[in-house]
Image: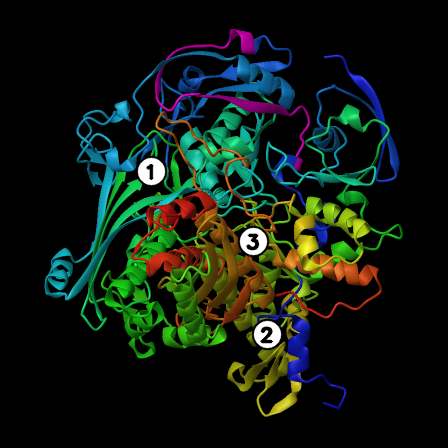
Amino acid sequence: MAKSQVAMKINGKTVEALVEPRTLLIYFLRDQLGITGPHIGCDTSHCGACTVDLDGKSVKSCTVFAVQADGADIITIEGIANPDGTLHALQEGFRQMHGLQCGFCTPGMITRAYRLLQENKNPTEEEIRYGISGNLCRCTGYQNIVKAIQYAAAKLNGVTFQEAAE
Amino acid sequence: MNDMTPTSAERAAKLEGMGCKRKRVEDIRFTQGKGNYVDDIKLPNMLYGEFNRSPYGHAHVKKIDTAKAAAVPGVVAVLTAETLKTVNLAWMPTLAGDVQMVLADGYVLFQNQEVAFVIADSREAAADAADLVEVEYEQLPVNVDPLKAMAPNAPVIREDLKGKTEGAHGKRKHYNHIFSWQAGDKAAADAAFAKADVTIREMISYPRVHPCPLETCQCVASFDKIKGELTLYGTFQAPHVIRTVGSLISKIPEHKIHVISPDVGGGFGNKVGAYPGYICSIVASIVTGVPVKWTESRIDNLSTTAFARDFHMDMELACTKDGKLLGLRCYTIADHGAFDACANATKWPAGLFSIISGSYDIPAAHCLVDGVYTNKAPGGVAYRCSFRVTEAAYCVERAMDIMAQKLGMDPADFRMKNLIRREQFPYTSAFGWQYDSGDYQTALTKAMEAVSYRKLRDEQKQKREAFKRGETRELMGIGVIHFTEIVGAGPSRNCDILGIAMFDSAEIRIHPTGSGICRLGTKSQGQGHETTYAQIIATELGLAADSITVEEGNTDTAPYGLGTYGSRSTPVSGAATAMACRKIKAKAQMIAAYMLEVHDDDLEWDVDRFRVKGNPERFKTMTELAWAAYHEVPPGMEPGLEAVDYYDPPNFTFPFGAYICVVDVDVDTGMIKVRRFYALDDCGTRINPMIIEGQIHGGLAEAFGIAMGQEIHYDDDGNVTTASFLDYFLPTAVETPRWETDWTTTPSPHHPIGAKGVGESPNVGGVPCFSNAVNDAFAFLGSTHIQMPHDHWRVWTAAEKLGLHA
């Protein structure tokens, strides 16, 4: 199959590559570029494990062809940390609030929350639950994920988060 | 000592040992996308495998033509049963003593059964070619109903077993019959029913569901032709079992097989067994001489590997008129699908189902289980429970409500009256299990007080009156349960897998500078083993948890163990860890005595050191003793500081809990709002309360999914209609309720640290609690039992049948 040339910015670095037109963005990231943080958990765009940030929107990268991302600016879990190398408030919050167990949904979940907290700097619990409803988790029962995002929101807003993980 | 010396309590706190809400070690890599899961593995020249699968539930395979598939650019080989026969692998043994087709050998017995395996240089080429395998089928009559499996004219599922009247577990009474298994005393149970004032009988079905971890089953097989060695990376909950079974099946010597389970993205029982994908990948790697990866799709996962439940339980209870239980009888039909690939301890075809007397003092009981073949996928795994325990807990907890309803008693009061009393422990049940410890009344009382149970019942009464007056269309339901699990398989006198006793192991090596590594036969899939085992060592050896590396999942380096499922890691490997620590500590004590020039008996342990009794200024810390172990051991003693322990538990452990759920049901839409869910768990000694609470949240969410919407459903033609997330309900953060957790602590008397295991309790207790709440909402209208799942449509239908929409 004839390949197409694509160029995009991934985690701040420009990447140029040849891809089959039918290659999904998630396979381009994982198999071709070795960016294995985003995962694959379903065939139907339900689970959100493959979530990346594409031009300022949360996108399920199993639903986008790599050629559609030509020219895009993409952030994956590998690019979430602060520029100085310290962990992002969400990465810290997920650990502090026990917002993960097997870790398989975590990259997608954090990447989605990263955009959610830019869309809404101080979300309520209901807004968080709705905001991450495109991301499935089988281990945590979501309660501590909600807390992890609340922790990060507080930290990013310069407020101390008092509650402990439950 | 001076005032600057930290106190024992301060030193203990720094260790982050047992009881500490230690933050997880694993999270550092997982939150940065640096986990290493099977699909992240990419080896040089690696090929990809993909199955062609059966579109039919039951058919003859008349012809397979692979020519078009083989012609697809990038395709290297196409395997069929004929190819596998050349290495005697067209069929494989199952853990349950049956055999299973690896690739269709003349027949397909369930939809999506594996028919051919295409190997290509890309995922896409493999998938394209798999679609081009041409198979000629002749459809056969289908049966997907276990209750019809033993009818005189039922379709024959397993022609290969024709004429075989004996199965792995004794006599077969029908061509679709797999086994009969019974426990308890039938005559005693019958006598109890004969003298009972009140009896109930109900058909209680637990539908077929799926563990559905977010990561599906996957592997990479890499065969080195020069060395004759196989390295198998896979999503294995039990890597050593896979190595042994792999060796027995493939005839590759066991020392030439290296099984590696890297990070595993959830298991819940799905990843215990051996699947055709593993066998085909191994054969493909042997044939091609390069690594082969197989990655299961979600549809493949839900429709082929490891369903759970599908138990249909005809349950009876007998009681005196004042509510004292006298007897229990249960006859169960167990649907095992097309092959008996149940993951149980080998001698237990219905697992530990005879825990069905639950938390109650029932003098006489009997259960009988018949396993049957149908045109459905094989499996029957212990999904987030010890073998078949959740089926038993669901059945008895539903039946307790039905009996309470008939007696006109409050379900909590009826339970309280029949709970095994604290002074009865260790308690031997009518089925012969010896419950290790419990304080059931305290747990249930605490739960009832926490939710103001009596007030809830008053509110419910008022709402029911209001409903009758037509003032509301909402019904309030209260679910209350008390469950007892049997976990930690298991004692070698009870349990083995293919003849291997179900012990587990820990090997601990303390390095000269006082840090160390612990390797175990278990395998975490999210449970946080790297964090919690180190906490046991921290408390036992007085070394900071941060100084201990925990490593699992590499069969070359880990001591042999049976893996992680059935809540067995803490009860078995946790015990092995403590026992290995004690061997190390005993040696360290001798070194300390030598260095301090006192007798061993003159030393006492204090958090992180041995000190001279009555002279606490004279001591040696464990860190000092570690250094000494490598250069200053007493004459005649071997240098080094390490130990291995293989722990064969003397008994199972019996975690328990009391849960209460409050729901509001809209009878016109069938919508259910979970107002409140309170879970009190007693798992004995608590190693990391944060991780315990997290596991309870997760198990409750899975229980919510099962009770409220999940079913792996087949239509009459054998089509699986719920094989993707389009149709199979997985709760999101929006539907999932908020959880209230609580605990009591009743240590196990026979476990070295008193721990019982917890990961599965919330699924075992959660499902009946949700179901009881929904059923309770309708109970005052005369309804005794509404089958799960309680999705909107079924709840609406139940309301319709009760005439509530008139």
Q: Which residue is mark 2?
A: B591
Q: Amino acid at mark 1?
A: His
Q: Amino acid at mark 3?
A: Thr
Image quadrant in which the N terminus of chain B is located: bottom right
Q: In this rendering, do the residues under marks 3 and 2 share a single chain?
A: yes
Q: Amino acid at mark 2?
A: Ile
Measured as percent of width and height from the top left, residue B6 is found at: 71, 83
Q: Residue at x 49, y 74 (%)?
A: B450
Confirm whether the magenta stretch covers residue B56: yes
Q: Residue furthest bottom?
A: B614
Asked if the residues shown at circle 1 and circle 2 are in contact, with their CB atoms under 8 angstroms apart, the answer is no
Q: Residue at x 63, y 82 (%)?
A: B596
Residue at mark 3: B736
- Residue at 38% from the left image edge and 53% from the top image edge: B390
Helix, strand or loop for disc 2: helix
Residue B118 picture quarter: top right
Image position, residue B3 (x, y; %): 75, 90
Residue B303 % position (x, y) = 46, 32
Task: Judge from the rendering whether residue A151 lies leftward or rightward of residue B693; answer left or right.
Answer: right
Which span of residues is magenta-colored?
B40-69
Q: Which residue is mark 1?
A: B336
User: From the viewer's perspective, is the residue at label 3 or at label 2 nearer?
Assistant: 3
